[in-house]
Structure formats: C-alpha cells, structure tokens
C-alpha cells in the first residue's frame, strides 16, 4: 500500500457548470458562469434581485436553454437533455410557488409523486403497494407531516405546503435537489425546521438553494456563491463572503 492510498479522497463534483451563458435578446442574464457543487454539499446562491439566480436554476433543469457553456451532472451534459429527462437522471426542482394538489391529502400528494414506470403484476403489485406506503410514511415524518397524512393539503399552513412539495421531490430520490427561496413566507420556527430538514437530506444528495434570508443561509450553507449581473462576484464560506468588500459594496449599493 502506498502512502497515497491513506490520503482522504476529495469529494467528487456532482454538478459542474462551465462557461454558462444565456442571452435574452442580447442581454446576458447569466454570463460565462462557472460553478461546482460537491456530493452532499448544500450550496446557496445569493445576490441582488435580477442577478440571474432563478435563471441558473432554470438552465440546470432545462426550462431555459443555454446560449453557450456546459452543465455536467454525473458525467452527462444536461444542456443536451429535455426537461423530463433531466428529472429522470436525478435533478429535482422546487419552484417559488408550491405546486401541490390542494384537494388531495398529504398521503395522496406523496403517493402520486412516487416514481412509477416499472411494469408489475399480481403479487408483485401488492409488494409494490407496501413499498409505496412505507416510503410515504418515511417521507411524511421527515417533512414533519407524519401526523397529517389524512389532511387535505389545502388545510396545511403555508410552511407545511412548502415542506409537502419538498417531500414530493424527495420521494423521487433526486441526487441534486434545487430550491428557489424555500423559506419565503415561513415563520422563524418553520425556518429552523427547514434548515434541519435540509441538513438531514444531504446524507445522500446535494442541495442547491437560492435564498434571501441571511440567517437561514448561515444555518444551512456549506458554501455560498454570490451572483451579480450573471457572474460570480464572490464564493466561499458565509463568513468569507460576508466580509468580502465587493459583496458589501453590491449589497449596500442597493
Ligand atoms: P434573480 O432570480 O436573481 O432575481 P432572474 O434570474 O429571475 O434574477 O433574472 C435575471 C435577469 O434576467 C432579470 O433582468 C430578468 O428580467 C431577466 N430574465 C429572466 N428570464 C428572462 C426571460 N425568459 N426573458 C427575458 N429576460 C429574462
Ligand atoms: Mg429569483
């Protein structure tokens, strides 16, 4: 055994963005951006309004097509894939407004999100049912809704609806979960619980979050990327980014 083998292996990048640009009628909302997210990392993108944060998520999930550049997820170039294919390779995206089914229960919302596609028959079907029920229960307790399974989603609080939508993504077991302003409109205690939830789910996935709430960012971020005019202005720990004069100038200037 060589000494090299005892060295700690650096974590692999689950997502590599290189030279990413999107131009809307000549306006570059994202401009030659590079960004690397590690396995199990929680990365937060912050930046002033119009910086291009939501557009970055739109590009990754295939809703917006890049003008140039590459987005590599587990070795595949996502810019070549369609939106539904990007979901299939393991990228889940939560939008700002929750898209849950208000008149279905918590259980039903989670159940319909369970990935299907394999063909099953007879006894296998029963086993599958048990598998679905177990998974729904597991996810429901993870999102703090274990005792609300029979409740129609419309009766949940705003924060609980946000958690339900996160649960609907988690049940598909994405390797990269993207969330756009997940704690907007949440109470302080709901924000704390959401931070706890994100820490728990990164045991086997990475999370990319766009968020304004600085206390929340501080609670969750492994690293922070500050976006400004479609480019990285600063990157690193929250501590480092907060004391970067360039970041202070951009935030005070607004
Ligand atoms: P953020 O989420 O950081 O507030 P966005 O990514 O939503 O910013 O937007 C960045 C810039 O790109 C804004 O100036 C916005 O108006 C513009 N933009 C976003 N999407 C489009 C689009 N589909 N067509 C034209 N301009 C867009
Ligand atoms: Mg936005």
Image (cartoon, helix red, strand yellow):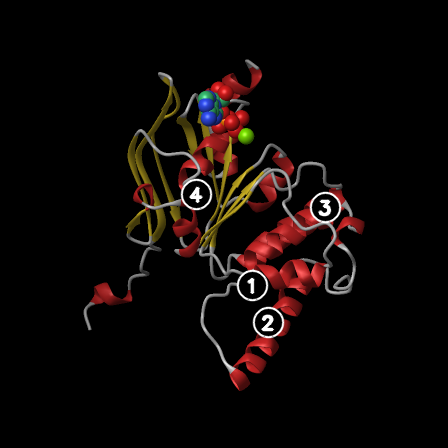
Instruction: Using the numbered discs, state the Cα–Cα distance from disc 2 to disc 1 in whole angstroms.
Output: 7 Å
Query: Badge 2: how crowded within 10 Å, few (<14), some, or many (20+)?
Result: some
Quarter placement of the C terminus: top right
Instruction: Using the numbered discs, state the Cα–Cα distance from disc 4 to disc 1 in whole angstroms.
Output: 19 Å
Residue at far bottom of view: 123
- Determine the secondary structure under disc 2: helix
Evaluate if marks 2 and 1 touch, with contact meaning CB atoms under 8 Å apart.
yes
Find ligand 2 in the image and state its quadrant: top right
Residue 67 percent location from the top left of the image: 31, 29
Q: Is mark 3 within 8 Å of ligand 2?
A: no
The tag earlier along the polypeptide, 2 or 1, is: 1
Instruction: Using the numbered discs, state the Cα–Cα distance from disc 4 to disc 3 in whole angstroms.
Output: 24 Å
Would you say residue 227 is visible in this rendering? yes
Numbered label tally = 4
Q: Nearer the viewer, residue 2 or 198?
A: 198
Residue 161 percent location from the top left of the image: 70, 48
């Amino acid at each position: 055994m060589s000494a090299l083998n005892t060295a700690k292996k650096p974590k692999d990048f689950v997502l590599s963005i290189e030279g990413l640009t999107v131009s809307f009628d000549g306006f570059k909302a994202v401009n030659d951006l590079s960004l690397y997210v590690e396995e199990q990392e929680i990365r937060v993108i912050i930046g002033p309004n119009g910086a291009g944060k939501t557009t970055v998520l739109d590009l990754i999930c295939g809703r917006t097509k890049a003008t140039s550049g590459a987005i590599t997820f587990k070795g595949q170039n996502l810019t070549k894939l369609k939106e539904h294919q990007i979901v299939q390779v393991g990228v889940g995206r939560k939008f700002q407004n929750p898209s849950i089914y208000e008149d279905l229960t918590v259980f039903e919302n989670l159940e319909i999100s369970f990935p299907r596609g394999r063909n099953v028959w007879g006894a296998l079907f029963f086993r599958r049912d048990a598998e679905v029920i177990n998974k729904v229960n597991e996810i429901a307790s993870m999102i703090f809704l274990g005792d609300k399974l029979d409740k129609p989603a419309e009766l949940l609080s705003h924060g609980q609806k946000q958690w339900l939508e996160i649960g609907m993504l988690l049940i598909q077991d994405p390797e990269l979960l993207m969330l756009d302003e997940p704690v907007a409109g949440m109470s302080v205690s709901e924000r704390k619980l959401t931070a706890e939830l994100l820490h728990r789910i990164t045991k086997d996935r990475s999370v990319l979050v766009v968020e304004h709430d600085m206390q929340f960012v501080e609670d969750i971020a492994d690293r922070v990327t500050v976006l400004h005019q479609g480019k990285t202005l600063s990157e690193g720990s929250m501590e480092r980014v907060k004391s970067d004069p360039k970041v202070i100038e951009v935030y005070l200037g607004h």
